[in-house]
Amino acid sequence: MSFDLVLFGGTGDLAWRKLMPALFQAFRHGTLPPDGRIIGIARDDLSDDQYRALIRSRFDAVDLDKRPTPQEFERFAGLLHYLRVDLSQPQDYARLAATLRERQAETVVMYLATAPALFTTVVQQAAAAGLNRPNTRLVLEKPLGHDLASNRAINEAVRQVLSEKQVFRIDHYLGKPAVQNLFALRFGNALFEPVWRREHISNIQITIAEDFGVEKRGAFYDSTGALRDMVQNHALQLLCALAMEPPINAHADAIRDEKLKVLRSLKPWTPETLDQHVVRGQYGPGKVNGESVIGYRDEPGVDPDSRTETFVGLRADIASWRWAGVPFYIRTGKRLAAREAHIVVNFREAPHAIFNAPPGTSNKLVIHLQPRDGLEMHLLAQGQENRRNGSTLAPVQLNLDFDKRFGTERVGAYERLLLDVIAGRLNLFVRSDEQEEAWRWVEPLLEHWRSDQREPRIYAAGTWGPSASSGMIARAGHCWSEEC
Ligand code: NAP
Protein backbone atom coordinates (compact mmCIF):
# COMPACT_ATOMS: atom_id res chain seq x y z
CA MET A 1 0.00 0.00 0.00
CA SER A 2 1.52 3.34 -1.01
CA PHE A 3 1.25 6.37 1.25
CA ASP A 4 2.34 9.99 1.52
CA LEU A 5 2.57 11.26 5.09
CA VAL A 6 2.69 15.04 5.16
CA LEU A 7 4.06 16.36 8.43
CA PHE A 8 2.87 19.95 8.79
CA GLY A 9 5.42 21.23 11.31
CA GLY A 10 8.07 18.77 10.14
CA THR A 11 10.90 20.62 11.90
CA GLY A 12 9.12 21.10 15.23
CA ASP A 13 9.53 19.56 18.66
CA LEU A 14 6.73 17.00 18.30
CA ALA A 15 8.01 15.89 14.89
CA TRP A 16 11.54 15.18 15.96
CA ARG A 17 10.94 14.04 19.55
CA LYS A 18 7.96 11.74 18.97
CA LEU A 19 6.92 11.28 15.35
CA MET A 20 10.22 10.64 13.57
CA PRO A 21 11.44 8.17 16.24
CA ALA A 22 8.08 6.37 16.06
CA LEU A 23 8.17 6.25 12.25
CA PHE A 24 11.72 4.96 12.40
CA GLN A 25 10.75 2.21 14.87
CA ALA A 26 7.94 1.14 12.55
CA PHE A 27 10.43 1.15 9.68
CA ARG A 28 12.89 -0.92 11.73
CA HIS A 29 10.17 -3.38 12.75
CA GLY A 30 9.17 -3.76 9.10
CA THR A 31 5.61 -2.61 9.81
CA LEU A 32 5.75 0.71 7.94
CA PRO A 33 4.54 0.05 4.39
CA PRO A 34 7.72 0.35 2.32
CA ASP A 35 6.13 2.29 -0.52
CA GLY A 36 5.85 5.60 1.28
CA ARG A 37 7.08 9.17 1.55
CA ILE A 38 7.31 11.26 4.70
CA ILE A 39 7.17 14.89 3.64
CA GLY A 40 8.21 17.44 6.26
CA ILE A 41 6.71 20.91 5.91
CA ALA A 42 7.88 24.16 7.48
CA ARG A 43 8.96 27.65 6.41
CA ASP A 44 12.74 27.12 6.35
CA ASP A 45 14.36 26.83 2.97
CA LEU A 46 15.78 23.28 3.09
CA SER A 47 16.62 20.69 0.46
CA ASP A 48 15.63 17.05 1.00
CA ASP A 49 19.23 16.29 1.96
CA GLN A 50 19.40 19.15 4.44
CA TYR A 51 16.16 17.95 6.02
CA ARG A 52 17.53 14.40 6.26
CA ALA A 53 20.71 15.74 7.90
CA LEU A 54 18.58 17.72 10.37
CA ILE A 55 16.54 14.66 11.30
CA ARG A 56 19.71 12.56 11.51
CA SER A 57 21.26 15.02 13.99
CA ARG A 58 18.11 14.99 16.09
CA PHE A 59 18.28 11.21 16.49
CA ASP A 60 21.35 11.78 18.68
CA ALA A 61 18.95 12.78 21.46
CA VAL A 62 16.99 9.51 21.20
CA ASP A 63 17.67 6.53 23.54
CA LEU A 64 20.59 4.48 22.27
CA ASP A 65 18.56 1.35 21.55
CA LYS A 66 16.06 3.39 19.51
CA ARG A 67 18.73 5.22 17.51
CA PRO A 68 19.33 4.12 13.90
CA THR A 69 22.69 2.76 12.81
CA PRO A 70 24.22 4.70 9.88
CA GLN A 71 23.06 1.95 7.51
CA GLU A 72 19.54 1.96 8.94
CA PHE A 73 19.32 5.74 8.71
CA GLU A 74 20.48 5.71 5.12
CA ARG A 75 17.62 3.40 4.18
CA PHE A 76 15.09 5.30 6.33
CA ALA A 77 16.27 8.63 4.85
CA GLY A 78 15.09 7.41 1.46
CA LEU A 79 11.53 8.01 2.71
CA LEU A 80 12.21 11.57 3.93
CA HIS A 81 11.43 14.63 1.83
CA TYR A 82 10.96 18.31 2.56
CA LEU A 83 8.80 21.06 1.17
CA ARG A 84 8.95 24.72 2.13
CA VAL A 85 5.38 25.91 2.65
CA ASP A 86 4.17 28.89 4.65
CA LEU A 87 0.86 27.58 5.92
CA SER A 88 -0.53 31.07 6.34
CA GLN A 89 -0.06 31.75 2.58
CA PRO A 90 -2.86 30.28 0.41
CA GLN A 91 -0.70 30.27 -2.75
CA ASP A 92 1.86 27.94 -1.09
CA TYR A 93 -0.62 25.04 -0.96
CA ALA A 94 -0.50 24.62 -4.74
CA ARG A 95 3.12 23.45 -4.42
CA LEU A 96 2.06 20.81 -1.92
CA ALA A 97 -0.83 19.70 -4.14
CA ALA A 98 1.55 19.38 -7.11
CA THR A 99 4.01 17.29 -5.05
CA LEU A 100 1.23 14.93 -3.98
CA ARG A 101 -0.24 14.75 -7.49
CA GLU A 102 3.05 13.63 -9.03
CA ARG A 103 2.88 10.35 -7.12
CA GLN A 104 -0.84 9.60 -6.63
CA ALA A 105 -0.30 7.56 -3.45
CA GLU A 106 -3.20 5.36 -2.36
CA THR A 107 -3.33 7.10 1.04
CA VAL A 108 -2.43 10.68 1.89
CA VAL A 109 -2.04 11.46 5.61
CA MET A 110 -1.96 15.11 6.66
CA TYR A 111 -0.53 15.29 10.18
CA LEU A 112 -1.00 18.69 11.83
CA ALA A 113 2.05 18.89 14.12
CA THR A 114 1.93 22.64 14.17
CA ALA A 115 0.41 25.42 16.28
CA PRO A 116 -3.34 24.88 16.90
CA ALA A 117 -3.97 28.46 15.72
CA LEU A 118 -3.13 27.23 12.21
CA PHE A 119 -5.45 24.19 12.21
CA THR A 120 -8.51 25.84 10.67
CA THR A 121 -6.47 27.69 8.03
CA VAL A 122 -4.59 24.54 7.05
CA VAL A 123 -7.75 22.48 6.75
CA GLN A 124 -9.52 25.13 4.65
CA GLN A 125 -6.56 25.93 2.41
CA ALA A 126 -5.68 22.27 1.88
CA ALA A 127 -9.26 21.66 0.77
CA ALA A 128 -9.18 24.71 -1.51
CA ALA A 129 -6.10 23.19 -3.15
CA GLY A 130 -8.04 19.96 -3.74
CA LEU A 131 -6.37 17.93 -1.01
CA ASN A 132 -9.61 16.75 0.62
CA ARG A 133 -9.97 13.67 -1.54
CA PRO A 134 -11.53 10.39 -0.38
CA ASN A 135 -8.03 8.97 0.22
CA THR A 136 -7.06 11.84 2.57
CA ARG A 137 -6.68 11.25 6.31
CA LEU A 138 -6.26 14.15 8.68
CA VAL A 139 -4.45 13.77 12.02
CA LEU A 140 -5.14 16.40 14.67
CA GLU A 141 -2.95 16.79 17.74
CA LYS A 142 -4.08 18.08 21.10
CA PRO A 143 -4.90 20.68 22.20
CA LEU A 144 -7.91 20.83 19.92
CA GLY A 145 -9.18 24.19 21.06
CA HIS A 146 -8.96 25.78 24.50
CA ASP A 147 -12.66 25.51 25.36
CA LEU A 148 -15.89 24.07 23.98
CA ALA A 149 -16.50 26.90 21.50
CA SER A 150 -13.02 26.81 19.96
CA ASN A 151 -13.10 23.01 19.84
CA ARG A 152 -16.42 23.13 18.01
CA ALA A 153 -15.09 25.74 15.59
CA ILE A 154 -12.18 23.46 14.60
CA ASN A 155 -14.43 20.42 14.31
CA GLU A 156 -16.91 22.41 12.22
CA ALA A 157 -14.16 23.61 9.85
CA VAL A 158 -13.01 20.01 9.46
CA ARG A 159 -16.57 18.75 8.94
CA GLN A 160 -17.02 21.18 6.02
CA VAL A 161 -14.30 19.44 4.03
CA LEU A 162 -13.83 15.88 5.35
CA SER A 163 -16.04 13.14 6.71
CA GLU A 164 -15.64 11.99 10.32
CA LYS A 165 -14.06 8.70 9.24
CA GLN A 166 -11.22 10.64 7.62
CA VAL A 167 -10.32 12.41 10.88
CA PHE A 168 -7.89 10.94 13.42
CA ARG A 169 -7.84 12.93 16.68
CA ILE A 170 -4.82 11.78 18.64
CA ASP A 171 -4.87 11.09 22.32
CA HIS A 172 -1.57 9.28 22.64
CA TYR A 173 -2.67 7.66 25.92
CA LEU A 174 -4.97 5.46 23.85
CA GLY A 175 -1.90 4.22 21.96
CA LYS A 176 -0.16 3.05 25.13
CA PRO A 177 0.09 -0.75 25.33
CA ALA A 178 -1.15 -0.66 28.93
CA VAL A 179 -4.35 1.14 27.88
CA GLN A 180 -5.00 -1.42 25.16
CA ASN A 181 -4.45 -4.06 27.81
CA LEU A 182 -7.07 -2.37 29.93
CA PHE A 183 -9.57 -2.99 27.12
CA ALA A 184 -8.24 -6.57 26.84
CA LEU A 185 -8.56 -7.08 30.59
CA ARG A 186 -12.13 -5.86 30.70
CA PHE A 187 -13.52 -7.22 27.45
CA GLY A 188 -11.28 -10.20 26.66
CA ASN A 189 -11.67 -11.91 30.04
CA ALA A 190 -14.87 -13.07 31.66
CA LEU A 191 -13.36 -12.81 35.14
CA PHE A 192 -13.73 -9.11 35.86
CA GLU A 193 -17.02 -8.11 34.25
CA PRO A 194 -19.28 -9.48 37.02
CA VAL A 195 -17.41 -7.52 39.72
CA TRP A 196 -16.80 -4.39 37.64
CA ARG A 197 -19.60 -2.40 39.26
CA ARG A 198 -20.77 -0.49 42.27
CA GLU A 199 -21.64 -3.58 44.29
CA HIS A 200 -17.95 -4.62 44.37
CA ILE A 201 -15.90 -1.52 43.66
CA SER A 202 -15.54 1.18 46.27
CA ASN A 203 -13.62 3.80 44.26
CA ILE A 204 -11.30 4.17 41.28
CA GLN A 205 -8.24 6.41 41.16
CA ILE A 206 -6.45 7.71 38.10
CA THR A 207 -3.04 9.29 38.67
CA ILE A 208 -0.97 10.93 35.94
CA ALA A 209 2.05 12.40 37.71
CA GLU A 210 5.05 14.17 36.23
CA ASP A 211 8.16 14.97 38.26
CA PHE A 212 9.36 17.56 35.74
CA GLY A 213 8.12 21.14 35.47
CA VAL A 214 7.13 23.18 32.44
CA GLU A 215 10.62 22.87 30.90
CA LYS A 216 10.90 25.20 27.89
CA ARG A 217 7.15 25.46 27.38
CA GLY A 218 6.36 27.94 30.18
CA ALA A 219 4.44 30.40 28.00
CA PHE A 220 2.37 27.64 26.37
CA TYR A 221 1.64 25.97 29.70
CA ASP A 222 0.72 29.21 31.44
CA SER A 223 -2.14 29.74 29.01
CA THR A 224 -3.16 26.09 29.19
CA GLY A 225 -2.92 24.55 32.69
CA ALA A 226 -3.31 20.99 33.89
CA LEU A 227 -7.07 20.76 33.36
CA ARG A 228 -6.84 21.45 29.62
CA ASP A 229 -3.48 19.73 29.18
CA MET A 230 -4.22 16.43 30.94
CA VAL A 231 -7.74 16.09 32.36
CA GLN A 232 -9.94 17.09 29.40
CA ASN A 233 -8.22 14.53 27.20
CA HIS A 234 -5.99 11.80 28.71
CA ALA A 235 -7.59 11.42 32.14
CA LEU A 236 -11.15 11.44 30.79
CA GLN A 237 -10.23 8.91 28.10
CA LEU A 238 -8.86 6.62 30.82
CA LEU A 239 -12.02 7.16 32.84
CA CYS A 240 -14.08 6.15 29.79
CA ALA A 241 -12.02 2.99 29.26
CA LEU A 242 -12.62 2.07 32.91
CA ALA A 243 -16.29 2.93 33.10
CA MET A 244 -17.74 2.13 29.66
CA GLU A 245 -20.18 -0.69 29.04
CA PRO A 246 -18.91 -3.61 26.95
CA PRO A 247 -19.16 -2.53 23.29
CA ILE A 248 -21.09 -4.78 20.90
CA ASN A 249 -17.94 -5.38 18.84
CA ALA A 250 -14.44 -3.98 18.43
CA HIS A 251 -15.33 -1.53 15.66
CA ALA A 252 -14.32 2.07 16.19
CA ASP A 253 -17.84 3.48 16.47
CA ALA A 254 -19.05 0.71 18.78
CA ILE A 255 -16.24 1.62 21.19
CA ARG A 256 -16.65 5.35 20.75
CA ASP A 257 -20.43 5.16 21.27
CA GLU A 258 -19.84 3.56 24.68
CA LYS A 259 -17.18 6.11 25.68
CA LEU A 260 -19.55 8.89 24.67
CA LYS A 261 -22.26 7.48 26.97
CA VAL A 262 -19.84 7.65 29.91
CA LEU A 263 -18.99 11.27 29.19
CA ARG A 264 -22.69 12.10 28.91
CA SER A 265 -23.32 10.42 32.28
CA LEU A 266 -20.74 12.45 34.18
CA LYS A 267 -22.63 14.37 36.84
CA PRO A 268 -22.64 18.08 36.04
CA TRP A 269 -20.86 20.40 38.46
CA THR A 270 -22.84 22.18 41.16
CA PRO A 271 -21.68 25.06 43.41
CA GLU A 272 -21.18 22.46 46.13
CA THR A 273 -19.12 20.00 44.08
CA LEU A 274 -17.08 22.84 42.57
CA ASP A 275 -16.16 23.73 46.12
CA GLN A 276 -15.78 20.24 47.63
CA HIS A 277 -14.70 17.95 44.81
CA VAL A 278 -11.89 19.88 43.11
CA VAL A 279 -8.45 20.99 44.22
CA ARG A 280 -6.46 23.43 42.12
CA GLY A 281 -2.75 23.52 42.94
CA GLN A 282 0.42 25.16 41.74
CA TYR A 283 3.97 24.07 42.54
CA GLY A 284 6.26 26.18 44.64
CA PRO A 285 9.99 25.60 45.09
CA GLY A 286 11.09 22.25 46.46
CA LYS A 287 13.26 19.23 45.88
CA VAL A 288 12.72 16.69 43.13
CA ASN A 289 14.88 13.57 43.08
CA GLY A 290 17.25 15.26 45.53
CA GLU A 291 17.67 18.43 43.45
CA SER A 292 16.37 21.86 44.40
CA VAL A 293 13.98 23.29 41.84
CA ILE A 294 12.30 26.67 41.41
CA GLY A 295 8.60 27.33 41.82
CA TYR A 296 6.20 27.64 38.89
CA ARG A 297 5.94 31.44 39.02
CA ASP A 298 9.72 31.73 38.61
CA GLU A 299 9.81 29.56 35.49
CA PRO A 300 10.78 31.34 32.23
CA GLY A 301 7.73 32.37 30.22
CA VAL A 302 5.37 32.18 33.22
CA ASP A 303 3.54 35.24 34.56
CA PRO A 304 5.00 35.94 38.06
CA ASP A 305 1.41 36.37 39.33
CA SER A 306 0.07 33.39 37.44
CA ARG A 307 -2.91 31.51 38.86
CA THR A 308 -2.60 28.71 36.31
CA GLU A 309 -3.01 25.28 37.86
CA THR A 310 -0.12 22.82 37.62
CA PHE A 311 -2.10 20.30 39.68
CA VAL A 312 -5.70 19.16 39.59
CA GLY A 313 -7.26 16.66 41.95
CA LEU A 314 -10.94 15.99 41.47
CA ARG A 315 -13.79 13.60 42.08
CA ALA A 316 -16.03 12.67 39.17
CA ASP A 317 -19.32 10.82 39.62
CA ILE A 318 -21.12 8.86 36.96
CA ALA A 319 -24.89 8.79 36.99
CA SER A 320 -25.60 5.21 35.92
CA TRP A 321 -26.83 1.94 37.42
CA ARG A 322 -23.33 0.50 37.21
CA TRP A 323 -21.49 3.36 38.87
CA ALA A 324 -23.89 5.31 41.10
CA GLY A 325 -22.05 6.26 44.31
CA VAL A 326 -18.59 5.15 43.12
CA PRO A 327 -16.18 8.08 43.07
CA PHE A 328 -13.68 8.27 40.21
CA TYR A 329 -10.75 10.29 41.52
CA ILE A 330 -8.42 11.97 39.06
CA ARG A 331 -5.18 13.70 39.94
CA THR A 332 -2.52 15.02 37.66
CA GLY A 333 0.26 17.50 38.05
CA LYS A 334 3.75 18.68 37.38
CA ARG A 335 6.70 18.56 39.79
CA LEU A 336 5.11 15.77 41.77
CA ALA A 337 6.98 13.11 43.74
CA ALA A 338 7.41 10.74 40.80
CA ARG A 339 6.88 10.39 37.08
CA GLU A 340 4.27 7.70 36.88
CA ALA A 341 0.79 7.03 35.63
CA HIS A 342 -1.38 4.37 37.17
CA ILE A 343 -4.95 3.39 37.88
CA VAL A 344 -6.07 1.84 41.16
CA VAL A 345 -9.37 -0.02 41.31
CA ASN A 346 -10.24 -0.38 44.99
CA PHE A 347 -12.67 -3.20 45.71
CA ARG A 348 -14.99 -3.27 48.69
CA GLU A 349 -14.03 -5.10 51.84
CA ALA A 350 -15.22 -8.67 52.33
CA PRO A 351 -18.83 -8.40 53.55
CA HIS A 352 -18.27 -10.73 56.49
CA ALA A 353 -14.86 -11.17 58.13
CA ILE A 354 -13.90 -14.60 59.46
CA PHE A 355 -10.15 -13.78 59.36
CA ASN A 356 -8.21 -10.97 60.91
CA ALA A 357 -6.88 -8.65 58.26
CA PRO A 358 -4.96 -5.42 58.70
CA PRO A 359 -7.41 -2.50 58.52
CA GLY A 360 -8.00 -1.02 55.07
CA THR A 361 -6.56 -3.99 53.19
CA SER A 362 -9.29 -4.81 50.73
CA ASN A 363 -8.47 -6.14 47.28
CA LYS A 364 -7.20 -3.76 44.67
CA LEU A 365 -6.18 -3.94 41.08
CA VAL A 366 -3.35 -1.61 40.08
CA ILE A 367 -2.85 -0.92 36.39
CA HIS A 368 0.57 0.63 35.73
CA LEU A 369 0.65 2.77 32.59
CA GLN A 370 4.11 4.33 32.87
CA PRO A 371 7.02 4.13 33.27
CA ARG A 372 6.40 0.42 33.65
CA ASP A 373 3.56 -1.35 32.08
CA GLY A 374 1.80 -4.02 34.10
CA LEU A 375 -0.93 -5.24 36.42
CA GLU A 376 -0.88 -5.97 40.13
CA MET A 377 -3.70 -7.75 41.92
CA HIS A 378 -3.55 -7.14 45.67
CA LEU A 379 -4.98 -10.06 47.62
CA LEU A 380 -4.91 -11.31 51.19
CA ALA A 381 -3.21 -14.60 52.06
CA GLN A 382 -1.58 -16.51 54.87
CA GLY A 383 2.16 -15.95 54.73
CA GLN A 384 4.94 -17.84 56.52
CA GLU A 385 4.80 -15.37 59.39
CA ASN A 386 1.14 -15.77 60.21
CA ARG A 387 0.79 -19.51 59.60
CA ARG A 388 1.15 -20.02 63.34
CA ASN A 389 -1.94 -17.96 63.78
CA GLY A 390 -4.18 -19.26 60.99
CA SER A 391 -6.79 -16.56 61.36
CA THR A 392 -4.58 -13.60 60.43
CA LEU A 393 -4.04 -12.57 56.83
CA ALA A 394 -1.33 -10.50 55.18
CA PRO A 395 -1.44 -8.55 51.90
CA VAL A 396 0.24 -10.18 48.87
CA GLN A 397 0.44 -9.24 45.22
CA LEU A 398 0.06 -11.05 41.94
CA ASN A 399 2.29 -9.22 39.48
CA LEU A 400 2.17 -9.17 35.73
CA ASP A 401 4.97 -7.15 34.15
CA PHE A 402 4.13 -6.76 30.47
CA ASP A 403 7.69 -5.77 29.53
CA LYS A 404 9.06 -8.97 31.07
CA ARG A 405 6.27 -11.05 29.61
CA PHE A 406 6.26 -9.63 26.10
CA GLY A 407 9.71 -7.95 25.91
CA THR A 408 10.56 -4.26 25.82
CA GLU A 409 10.50 -4.17 22.01
CA ARG A 410 6.77 -3.56 22.14
CA VAL A 411 5.11 -1.08 19.85
CA GLY A 412 5.20 2.43 21.36
CA ALA A 413 2.15 4.70 21.51
CA TYR A 414 2.98 6.99 18.58
CA GLU A 415 4.25 4.08 16.50
CA ARG A 416 1.00 2.23 16.98
CA LEU A 417 -1.12 5.30 16.27
CA LEU A 418 0.80 6.29 13.14
CA LEU A 419 0.48 2.76 11.75
CA ASP A 420 -3.24 2.83 12.55
CA VAL A 421 -3.67 6.11 10.66
CA ILE A 422 -1.88 4.76 7.60
CA ALA A 423 -4.01 1.60 7.76
CA GLY A 424 -7.22 3.61 8.37
CA ARG A 425 -8.04 2.04 11.77
CA LEU A 426 -9.99 4.52 13.90
CA ASN A 427 -10.44 2.53 17.14
CA LEU A 428 -7.81 4.42 19.13
CA PHE A 429 -8.82 7.90 17.98
CA VAL A 430 -11.29 10.29 19.51
CA ARG A 431 -14.52 11.22 17.75
CA SER A 432 -15.62 14.87 17.64
CA ASP A 433 -18.70 14.28 19.82
CA GLU A 434 -16.57 12.62 22.54
CA GLN A 435 -14.21 15.54 22.53
CA GLU A 436 -17.01 18.10 22.69
CA GLU A 437 -18.67 16.26 25.56
CA ALA A 438 -15.39 16.24 27.50
CA TRP A 439 -15.02 19.98 26.95
CA ARG A 440 -18.64 20.50 28.05
CA TRP A 441 -17.89 18.75 31.34
CA VAL A 442 -14.66 20.63 32.18
CA GLU A 443 -15.86 24.04 31.05
CA PRO A 444 -17.72 24.96 34.28
CA LEU A 445 -14.47 24.34 36.14
CA LEU A 446 -12.61 26.71 33.86
CA GLU A 447 -15.33 29.34 34.34
CA HIS A 448 -15.31 28.81 38.10
CA TRP A 449 -11.55 29.35 38.29
CA ARG A 450 -11.76 32.40 36.05
CA SER A 451 -14.16 34.10 38.45
CA ASP A 452 -12.69 32.67 41.68
CA GLN A 453 -10.30 35.21 43.15
CA ARG A 454 -8.65 32.66 45.44
CA GLU A 455 -5.07 31.65 44.75
CA PRO A 456 -4.37 28.06 43.74
CA ARG A 457 -3.05 25.97 46.62
CA ILE A 458 0.73 26.05 46.54
CA TYR A 459 2.46 22.69 47.02
CA ALA A 460 6.14 22.01 47.47
CA ALA A 461 7.74 20.56 44.33
CA GLY A 462 8.54 16.89 44.84
CA THR A 463 5.37 16.08 46.84
CA TRP A 464 2.06 14.54 45.80
CA GLY A 465 0.37 17.94 45.49
CA PRO A 466 -1.59 20.07 47.97
CA SER A 467 -2.69 18.35 51.19
CA ALA A 468 -6.23 19.43 50.29
CA SER A 469 -6.17 16.72 47.63
CA SER A 470 -5.87 14.08 50.38
CA GLY A 471 -8.51 15.93 52.38
CA MET A 472 -10.88 15.89 49.40
CA ILE A 473 -10.85 12.12 49.09
CA ALA A 474 -10.66 11.53 52.85
CA ARG A 475 -14.10 13.17 53.14
CA ALA A 476 -15.53 10.09 51.40
CA GLY A 477 -13.43 7.77 53.61
CA HIS A 478 -10.81 7.10 50.92
CA CYS A 479 -7.09 7.73 50.53
CA TRP A 480 -4.64 7.97 47.63
CA SER A 481 -2.72 4.79 46.92
CA GLU A 482 0.58 5.92 48.45
CA GLU A 483 -1.17 6.94 51.68
CA CYS A 484 -2.87 3.66 52.55
P1 NAP B 1 6.96 23.70 17.58
O1 NAP B 1 8.20 23.06 18.09
O2 NAP B 1 6.79 25.16 17.77
O3 NAP B 1 6.91 23.38 16.02
C1 NAP B 1 6.01 24.00 15.16
C2 NAP B 1 6.29 23.56 13.73
O4 NAP B 1 5.37 24.20 12.86
C3 NAP B 1 7.69 23.92 13.24
O5 NAP B 1 8.14 22.94 12.34
C4 NAP B 1 7.44 25.24 12.52
O6 NAP B 1 8.44 25.49 11.58
C5 NAP B 1 6.11 24.94 11.86
N1 NAP B 1 5.37 26.14 11.53
C6 NAP B 1 4.96 27.13 12.35
N2 NAP B 1 4.30 28.09 11.65
C7 NAP B 1 4.31 27.68 10.36
C8 NAP B 1 3.81 28.24 9.16
N3 NAP B 1 3.15 29.43 9.13
N4 NAP B 1 4.00 27.56 8.02
C9 NAP B 1 4.66 26.38 8.01
N5 NAP B 1 5.15 25.80 9.11
C10 NAP B 1 4.99 26.46 10.27
O7 NAP B 1 5.66 23.01 18.15
P2 NAP B 1 5.49 21.51 18.72
O8 NAP B 1 5.89 21.49 20.13
O9 NAP B 1 6.13 20.57 17.78
O10 NAP B 1 3.91 21.34 18.70
C11 NAP B 1 3.18 21.10 17.50
C12 NAP B 1 1.74 20.75 17.87
O11 NAP B 1 1.72 19.54 18.59
C13 NAP B 1 1.07 21.79 18.75
O12 NAP B 1 -0.30 21.79 18.44
C14 NAP B 1 1.30 21.22 20.14
O13 NAP B 1 0.36 21.71 21.05
C15 NAP B 1 1.12 19.75 19.85
N6 NAP B 1 1.77 18.87 20.82
C16 NAP B 1 3.10 18.96 21.04
C17 NAP B 1 3.71 18.08 21.92
C18 NAP B 1 5.20 18.12 22.16
O14 NAP B 1 5.68 17.26 22.91
N7 NAP B 1 5.93 19.02 21.57
C19 NAP B 1 2.94 17.13 22.60
C20 NAP B 1 1.57 17.06 22.34
C21 NAP B 1 1.00 17.93 21.44
P3 NAP B 1 8.88 26.99 11.14
O15 NAP B 1 8.57 27.90 12.28
O16 NAP B 1 10.34 26.85 10.85
O17 NAP B 1 8.09 27.29 9.94
Image (spheres, rainbow, N blue to C red):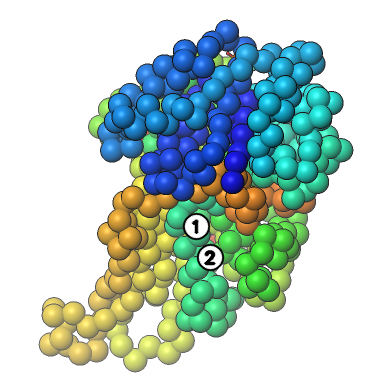
Would you name the residue on which mark 2 appears?
183
What residue type is disc 1 on? Val
Looking at the rendering, in which quadrant would you find the C terminus? bottom left
Q: Is residue 388 left or right of residue 419?
A: left
- Front residue of 331/439: it is 439
Provide residue 422's location: percent of width, then percent of height.
Answer: 60, 45
- Front residue of 317/46: it is 46
**Looking at mark 2, is its residue's CB closer than 8 Å to ligand 1?**
no
Q: Is residue 303 left or right of residue 287?
A: right
Q: Is the residue marked by circle 1 packed among few (<14), some (14-19), or many (20+) residues within 10 Å?
A: many
Which SS class for mark 2? helix
Q: Is residue 432 above or below residue 389?
A: above
Tell me if residue 7 can be seen. yes
Q: Residue at x 66, y 41 (%)?
A: 107
Q: Residue at x 61, y 17 (%)?
A: 83
What residue type is disc 2 on? Phe
Tell me if residue 124 can be seen. no
Q: Is residue 408 left or right of residue 132?
A: left
Q: Which mark is residue 179?
A: 1
Q: Quadrant of ligand 1?
A: top right
Q: Are marks 1 and 2 in contact (CB under 8 Å)?
A: yes
Residue 36 occupies quadrant: top right
- Front residue of 255/191: it is 255
Provide residue 99's location: percent of width, then percent of height.
Answer: 67, 23
Provide residue 299's location: percent of width, then percent of height.
Answer: 47, 19
Alpha carbon distance from label 1 to label 2: 7 Å
Q: Residue at x 38, y 41 (%)?
A: 28
Q: Residue at x 72, y 28 (%)?
A: 101
Q: Is the residue marked by circle 2 packed among few (<14), some (14-19), or many (20+) residues within 10 Å?
A: some
